[in-house]
Image (tube, rainbow, N blue to C red):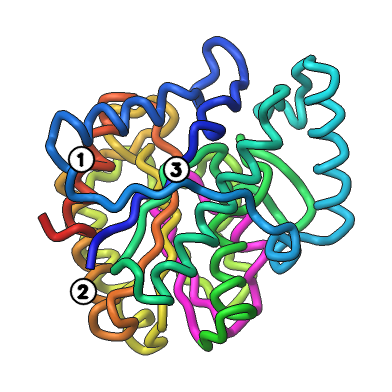
Amino acid sequence: MSTGFFTHPDCRSHDMGRGHPECPERLDAISDRLLVSGLDAALDHRDAPPVDLRDVELAHTHSYVVHLKDRLEQIAASGEPRAIDPDTIACAHTWRAVLRAAGAAVAATDAVIDGQIANAFCAVRPPGHHATRDEAMGFCFFNNVAIAARHALDACGLERVAIIDFDVHHGNGTEDIIAGDQRVLMASFFQHPLYPYSGAVPKGTNMVNVPVPPYTRGSEIRPILEQMWMPRLDEFRPQMIFISAGFDAHREDDLGQLGLVEADYEWITRRLKDLADRHAGGRIVSCLEGGYNLSALGRSVAAHLRVLAGV
């Protein structure tokens, strides 16, 4: 079976303004790199549908979903961009992009569980892992991975799923949503201290948080993950793995100060693929989070996908 690649042009239309690091060109950098590398031809390309808001409410409160929908539809009608928080700006096209980003994660989950594809990568924006149950923040509106994970559990009948987050920033929104849900084990590493200045003390026993100091290199992170992630994940035996794939821990990315390179993302992906093969029938859904140096982002996603696709 093939690796699904879920995206949609609406994800490029969300624009937070000139100079904002979370820009439409991020998706162009990924597409260009896949074409140049030849990986594009090895992927099963699929359009991301809009998400069903009933799925969104598996992870977010009803009041938050209604409020955000109303606010983003008002912005769409006015055509005037507005700040949701100091870092997060909505434009006239943001609501459509938000629906497609979460929709990609859910559609990829269904396709993998149904056996249509082996695994999937969602090249979407806006990202999601800072969105809490009832708050948009940190470039994020809906928490794409948390929505997909809860969909796998509550709609598809799985009993245990893992969420892996290797973004340079702590996935505080995902932790807020799934803390205490013993059906989910979340394992992450992140630079600390760094925005959003959380994660050093986990919110629940179903968390494996690994804060690392600035300038930590990939060669130092690998043994830490072997010691802290892998035993818990093997003991948990997830039936599906969801990845918040942030590539801003790359040494060329200015939004963090970690020292990973493409080979490190390849190594992490291979370890997760091995884990999925042992316990989850190979089922993985990976969703784009951070990664703001365009060249490093394209190269890192290609390394990630090369492992997922087995090419």
Q: Residues within 10 Å of mark 1 (few under 14, many from 20)?
A: many
Q: In this view, which residue lies farthest toward the top?
A: 18
For the residues bearing labels 2 and 3, Cβ distance under 8 angstroms: no
Residue at 48% from the left image edge and 41% from the top image edge: 124
Residue where numbered disc 2 is placed: 274
**2 vs 3, front mark:** 3
Relative depth, front residue between 59 and 232: 59
Q: Which residue is mark 1?
A: 261
Spot occupied by residue 93 in the image (x, y as percentages of width and height): 67, 27
User: Residue shown at 27%/73% (left/top)?
Assistant: 227
Task: Using the image, determine if residue 140 lies above or below residue 103.
Answer: above
Q: Which comes sooner in the sequence, label 2 or label 3?
A: 3
Residue 245: image x %, image y %?
39, 50
Residue 123 part of the magenta segment: no
**Residue nearest the viewer, comparing 260 with 149:** 149
Task: Please state the horizontal and vertical placement of residue 125, each as a whole percent of the image.
Answer: 52, 38
- Provide the residue span drawn in magenta: 160-189
Task: State the residue in front, 225 or 36.
Answer: 36
**From mark 1 to mark 2, how far is it between C-alphas?**
20 Å
Q: Secondary structure at mark 1?
A: loop
Amino acid type shown at disc 1 = Val
Is tag 3's residue or tag 1's residue first in the polypeptide sequence? 3
Q: Residue at x 85, y 18 (%)?
A: 78
Say which residue label 3 marks: 7
Residue 186 colored in magenta in the image: yes
Which quarter of the picture shows residue 116? Answer: bottom left
Is 187 displayed left or right of 59 in the figure?
A: left
Instruction: Classify mark 3: residues with Cα within 10 Å, few (<14), some (14-19) or many (20+).
Output: many
**Quarter the C terminus occupies:** bottom left
Circle nearer the viewer, 1 or 2: 2
